[in-house]
Amino acid sequence: MFDKQIYVNRRERLRSKVNSGLILILGNVDAPMNYADNTYHFRQDSSFLYFFGLDQQRLAGVIDVDAGEDYLLGDDVDIEDIIWMGPQVGLAERAAKVGVEKTDAFAKLFDMVDAAIKQGRKVHFLPPYRAENKLLLEQLTGIHPSKQRDYVSMELVHAVIALRSIKEPCELVEIEKACRTGYQMHVTAMKMAQPGVWEQKIAGTIEGISLAGGGMASFPIILSQNGETLHNHDHSNVLEEGKLMLTDAGAETTMRYASDFTRTVPVGGKFTQKQREIYEIVLAANNKATSLVKPGVTYLSVHLEAAKVIASGLKDLGLMKGDVDEAVKNGAHAMFFPHGLGHMMGLDVHDMEDLGQIYVGYDDEVRPVDQFGTAYLRLGRRLQEGFVITNEPGVYFIPALIDKWQSEKINHEFINFDKVNEYRDFGGIRLEDDILVTADGGEIIAERVPITPEEVEAVMNS
């Protein structure tokens, strides 16, 4: 964990952004896989980690805005726990490491919340996403899980987003660690992408690299020679010569900070001319987006400029036609690029998405665009120094989408469907980097994963 003063300062800053009442930050508990004692790997709630720093089960943090006091609620282990788990640090000692002086048994949480409600004080809580915490909130507040979203404290949501969006220097050190592990994951995947190799062998190998680096993969690994499926978690195929393998994967550090890269490589180590032409369009869009990143620029505008690079490149190949600006304005590019350019990243790979993507990625000034493709953009708001974001343009040939648009004559004035149908078995290409927004622009974090066609082929044939 970080120095305790980091957590003290974060809680104090949060307290200053909330008018009054109790702020309730619930930690997570173990979740069983197939029976109670066989649990999934524990993952603490990210907001709890941010403000209270402790990566153990069944803890709750309370910040009393009015009294200026912080509390940690939890239970010390008994002798039976020690037999199975070994000696454990006591609650008071753990709390001291994050600057919390007041501790009590977990059951006292019920008394604290009940007293606040009876006094007419506001109990602020974040949107619950786990069933166990939804049930706990019902016990604490009497609010049925189906109604809890209606009672979430938007004051608290906005305050947490404001704090967590700007990464502190200590956080950037952790994110760089995650990126260095992610680098090794992707270089290994490149070297393994040979004909006859089972996709699962590669996915399992690079997940092991993440675990060996200190944390889980930051999300379930996407790896497939059918890269036209954007989030393809099926690793059942055996790689074939002439195919492209898309790998979207990242690592977590021991402190749960994330990385998230995507690379697409030719199975066997050599791009065909057709593959290279599309690849260089995506790379140009990626580089263009990075060059535009700076404080004050909306990421929606960066997304649209990347889309124009894609549309222009596809027009040069005869796949699109007409005026590029008009094509993008009408969303014609989205048949090939049907997702957003990127998202926030930090303690969550889609940072703070549990708090509501509409609040994390947008604001009163910049609202989501209700158009296919751009509607999936997770981050559209103005960038600020200290944001960590992803930049991940792509070009995909999705047969079902091609058929739909062709039969319904969607954007037919901008798309050459006869030419597009020659690419039906192409697959997809996505290239993703992690970027820190600095005072001067956008900076790729740590060493860039090999990305030019020459770099990729060199790694694969080394």
Image: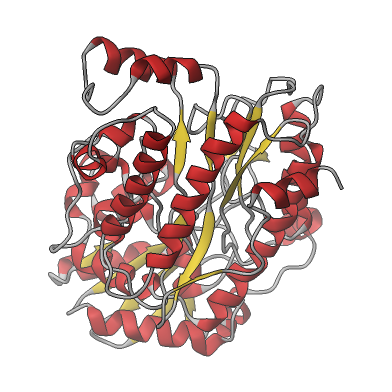
Can residue 186 be seen here?
no
Task: Give x and y (percent) for residue 334.
Answer: 32, 34
Up/down of 174 relative to 347, above or below: below
Which of the 4 image quadrants contains residue 355?
Answer: bottom left
Horizontally, residue 210 falls left or right of residue 129, namely right
Q: Nearer the viewer, residue 81 or 410?
A: 410
Q: Nearer the viewer, residue 314 or 103?
A: 314
Q: How many marks?
A: 0
Image quarter hosting the N terminus: bottom right
Task: Give x and y (percent) for residue 252.
Answer: 62, 58
Up/down of 204 relative to 138, above or below: above
Task: Give x and y (percent) for residue 206.
Answer: 74, 45
What residue is rendered at 73% in x and 60% in y? 214
Q: How is the image coloured?
A: secondary structure
Can residue 374 be seen here?
yes
Residue farthest along the right direction in this orientation = 462
Task: Give x and y (percent) for residue 322.
Answer: 24, 33
Which of the 4 image quadrants contains residue 374?
Answer: top left
Up/down of 426 relative to 13, above or below: above
Residue farthest along the top direction in this orientation = 407
Horizontally, residue 444 falls left or right of residue 122, namely right
Which of the 4 image quadrants contains residue 418?
Answer: top left
What residue is rendered at 45% in x and 75% in y? 167
Horizontally, residue 456 falls left or right of residue 462, namely left
